[in-house]
Amino acid sequence: MTETALREGGEEPAVGARWQRAAARGKVRGTTKYVADLPVPPCAQVAVYRSTRPHARILAVDVTQAAALPGVQAVVTGQDLFALLGERLLTGPAFADQPALAYDRVRYVGEPVAAVLARDLATARAAVDLIAVEYEDLEPVYDVETALKGEFFVHDVLRPSSVFGDLSHLRGKRDTNVCYEYNLRTGDVDAVPTDGVTTVSGEFWSPPVAHVPIELPCTTAWVEDDRLEILTTTQTPSYVRQAVADLLDLPLNKVRVRTSVLGGSFGSKMYDRLEPLAAALAWSQQTAVRLVATREEAFLLTTRHGAGVTSSMSADADGNIVAATADVAYDTGAFADVGPRITAKSGMVAAGPYRVENAWIRSRCIYTNKPSAGPFRGFGVPQVTWSHESLVDELARELGEDPAEFRRRHLLREGDEAPMGTVMHSADFVGCLDAVTDEIGWTTPYEKGEGRWRRGRGVAVGMKAVLTPTIANAVIQLNQDGSATLMISTVDMGQGSDTIMPQIVAEVLHLDEGSVRVVAADTDTTPYDTITAGSRSTYHTGNAVRAAAEKMRDKLVDLAAQRLGVAASDCKVTSGGVMSTTAQETVSISDLMHGHFGARGTTLTAEANFTTSWQPYDHETGRSRQVTEHWFAGAVAVEILVDTMTGRVKVEQLAVAGDVGRAINPTLVEQQLTGAAIMGIGHALFDELVFDQGQIVNGTLLDYQLPSVRDVPAKLTAHVIESAHRTGPFGAKGVGETGILAIAPAIANAVRDAVGVRITRLPLSPERVLEAMTEAGVS
Amino acid sequence: MRMLNLTVNGRVHDVPVDDNELLLDVLRTKVGCTSVREGCGVGACGACTVLVDGRSVSSCLALAVRHDGAEIVTADGLPGDDAVVEAFVECGAMQCGYCIPGFVLMTHELLAENPQPDAEQIAAHLEGNICRCGTYPEICAAVTSAAARGARL
Amino acid sequence: MPVLHQPRDLDEACTLLAELDDPMVYGGGTAIQILLKQGLLFAENLVDLSFVPGLTAIEATATGIRVGAMTPLRRMETDAQVAGVVPLAAATYGHVANPRVRNTASVGGNIAHGDYRLDPPTALLALDAQVELRSAHGQRRVPVRDFFVDFQLTAVEHGELITAIEIPAQPAGSASSYVKLSSLGENDWPSASAAALLVTEAGRRTLRLGIGALAPIPQFVSVDVSGHDLETTVEAAKAAADPLIDPIPDVRGSVTYKRRLGLVAVEDAVRRAWKDQDDD
Ligand SMILES: Cc1cc2nc3c(=O)[nH]c(=O)nc-3n(C[C@H](O)[C@H](O)[C@H](O)COP(=O)(O)OP(=O)(O)OC[C@H]3O[C@@H](n4cnc5c(N)ncnc54)[C@H](O)[C@@H]3O)c2cc1C
Ligand code: FES
Ligand code: FES
């Protein structure tokens, strides 16, 4: 941990300080208002009829009984909306494949087919039970194996939606379940001599899992004059505005999307969730509607991709990693969502953070008749990390080398070219690995135990690229009293943007803790921002915020120079205001602005944009000299116990490290790392959505397991590594996902260490562990 | 519909309720306590926790009409200098914050019964509250800190 | 939505249960509310017992204690009398769900719920509790060991309600323990559970075992372990439990796994009870 030195005059710097989280007290007392708590006009409550079939043609939807129920205001079917909106009814961040209500065909059990608007929810739900749908079943595609056979198709035609820069290369296609394929070809894996080469391989599986932020999705939409207002739980307000404007064919200024702080999201409240349906209902009925997903419905809205990876890693006689292969299949369910991006961005790191000369990777995104998968903390990378970190561990063991030392030898370092062709900068894998192995005392011997409980240790390293290219904007309004308001469309969902963005402003303008407030995202006032996701905000929006603050600083300096009659170069901003060395005078912000405008309460604004660029990857080789703006690097080390009688794994100690470039607020960074680690423990040990014939079996919190206080390791430490990024704001990068990447393989590697079995399917449930031990004859 | 008499955070409310209404919905929509939230609807997450006559209850499973005359405490009604609140704020025991009011109330119940709980007792009392952000280490530290301050309702 | 009735005394409750169409007793409501939300409850009338006096008392009897049906589960874990007279019951009730559910759920509703995975029945079986039932036709008592009839089916008949559970005191010198094994999160429902009670009476030593989550209904078996040492007791317990284990596969485990886990629960419970006895 580095603490920043005091600035001149003994002033505490804002960047690097452990400022208290914004609205801390309000969050503890529950007075902070989340979306569902904010006032809205009187609304029709909406309940949704959901498909009972995994794949079927809709022959008829009979709503007569439902519509006749007292208290029902309207019943709207997919066919109604299609008649009104045509193909515009289909939205999606990559392909326009997602209808707000299904109109011709249903593609998963739980897909919305009709919506009831009623005076209260109980009535709406009762009416839903009266809707009768006639289906003609189509052959369902439950898994990627069947999907790849190409006998039955989830979609007949695919049309790109052309919203995002990085997906602008998507083309329409038909008669395939593969909506995207990314290939990486580096060197020639087939040309690697086999002499003296050791190869390990495996088939790895990460199941679909659910995000389960505790706050349920909630969208309210209403018409005000000729505009549509939407108040919704989203991490992508700018996207939602565009999607809704496209859906209803409205100009952007006639759609207003607002949100509030979110009660967690982890990728679940992104792109098209409840918003297109709410918008279509409100607009078509010219009324106010409110949709709140129940927990059971939230399980159907989005999931994390189940993913299979068939992979191998080879080392030559000198122990150099000479080849890596990976065939990755992401099950995206009924809709592509942002699966194509996930497929590419995860595919390109599927060989791991190692120097590997020859790599062959194929990464595909595949439709099935299941609820759609989308982004989830880690963005597909945990699934490939599960593969490469298990393989590299096994390779080290085959070669008789220490797994941590073996990694250390091969990890990419500053200036190395990664397998996809991009040169590494500010990704201190070795520093992360050192920190976690030191913490758990990797090199000191320990008792493995001989009785019922066996002890083991494991490490793993994770690597992820930030979404590139993207766009961020910031507007700062400085108030005459010296306080400031920051307008950005970044959404605070617990990651702490409402705390650290003010720290960046305060650092530049020398303001105090608490003097900068972030306005909740509102597309009427806060400027465009690609998304709040993929750990991109600290770097991207942070850079926009910093640039805006610097422009503000220049304005203040100009005002002071004018007022004092000195050169601008003579003035600088300090904690007391703007100081001139020649004039030997400091003017406070408040005096400066009062003097300039001649009134109190005035404002000064400055704005900035930060847009990143990239070199699109080559479509044959998947390579690019600059595929990403920056990297996330993380490492995990664990010590675990395995109960050999029950198969239960208990994580005793976990150390997690992430290279964040520079910690704007070390406390929040540490919390992101430990919080992600705890979520990762769930993914490693029990988190799993179970399907039976396309239907979720455990879609309630009575059955779906989340880590509780009982699942937290007795010792859990976060290690902040700071290898400053040359273009990060004060060197900073994001951290939201870093902690989760390598948790599962670290634990599996420790299980391997403790009881000698290599498990390649997640989760490491007690049953699976015991089964593997029985198979291997370990007792 | 019948009138229900509830004392919420020391203030008396007479609210009309249906027989089948849940305490959660009545508190949110008729009393205005939005610190009480639905996370699971089945008693498994604790976001809807309230104290009824001092005891923690999942308001998502509680019929409102059974609580006629009850004294209800919600996190937003805790006194300004509440020791548990102070401890949570100082320990940074919140990320998104959505689950935290539930933990605060569980902590009050625990400390009322057991002013100096050990780690196991803390875990046993909080194990049914889910913080998806994974703020458990800070929350446990906050409980210990609140105990040291001598929390009282 | 079913209609809610709130009788003010037992007779009124019994009359309502006798006369209403499709009535259902409303105890703590923690199970009923979930069934309602899932659309799985088809009762037309709910008879809420919360205003019936006398159903929340915990009283000492000549042979043990009597617990009113509406006593919240949490009191079973915190009440000094319960902990003193039937420590196995106190420990087991403390394992149910979480404190909030335990504050609301009732002792009567818990067993009437009839779920095969419930924690408390294991202890009640080992302790040989009696269930007191009442209807418009009068009162009767059913031993807990006869109470669980089939999958989600109990001895409670139409028109009946549970008024109390009587639990005989744990004999002096007995030792006990409850073990709950979950296979997913640590705070989950059990995938296997066992309550073990070691009793020495008239020179004979008996191990009484209640096991849960391992068959369509909770199971009971008693084993004579006179003269056994710990290891042979463990073996005898496992041999006795094994034929009773008939697991239902689900997301928490296959039949094979639950069977294995069941034997571990039995073994752990016996070992801990043994240790409990040594510690005394
Ligand atoms: C999140 C969660 C986790 C849980 N985890 C566990 C666990 O780990 N272990 C465990 O053992 N249990 C667990 N449970 C189940 C819990 O124990 C039951 O929900 C509870 O005991 C039911 O009691 P109740 O009084 O609320 O019953 P109610 O919901 O009121 O009723 C349940 C049934 O009993 C009937 N009934 C109620 N009272 C009477 C009476 N006096 N006479 C006759 N019939 C009656 C009702 O008609 C109904 O059929 C969990 C529950 C939840 C919500
Ligand atoms: S909403 Fe009540 S416990 Fe989760
Ligand atoms: S702080 Fe987000 S769920 Fe607990």
Image: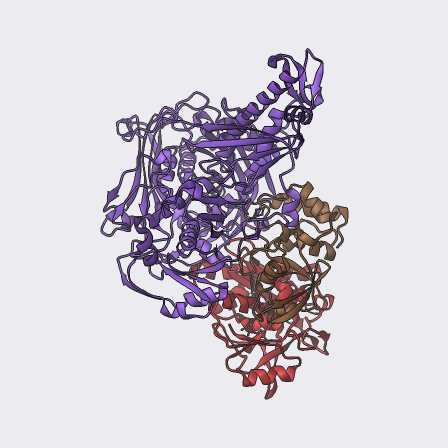
From the viewer's side, name the closer residue of A646 and A428: A428
In the rendered view, would you say C131 is above or below A215? below
Residue C230 seen by the camera: no
Q: Position of residue A80 (x, y in %)?
A: 33, 58
- Per the rendering, the colour in which chain C appears is red
The quarter of the picture where residue A652 lies is top right
The quarter of the picture where residue B127 lies is bottom right
In the displayed structure image, the side of residue A357 where residue A499 appears, left or right:
right
Chain in brown colour: B
In the rendered view, would you say A176 is above or below A602? below
Q: Residue furthest bottom?
A: C137
In the displayed structure image, the side of residue A335 where residue A674 appears, left or right:
right
Q: Position of residue B99 (x, y in %)?
A: 59, 50
From the viewer's side, name the closer residue of C157 and B71: B71
Chain in purple colour: A
Give the residue drawn at x 41%, y 34%. A392
In the displayed structure image, the side of residue C96 where residue A584 appears, left or right:
right
Residue A181 seen by the camera: yes
The quarter of the picture where residue A442 lies is top right
Q: How many marks?
A: 0
Q: Position of residue A358 (x, y in %)?
A: 32, 27
Q: Position of residue A66 (x, y in %)?
A: 40, 68
Task: Report the quarter where the N terminus of chain A lies.
Answer: top right
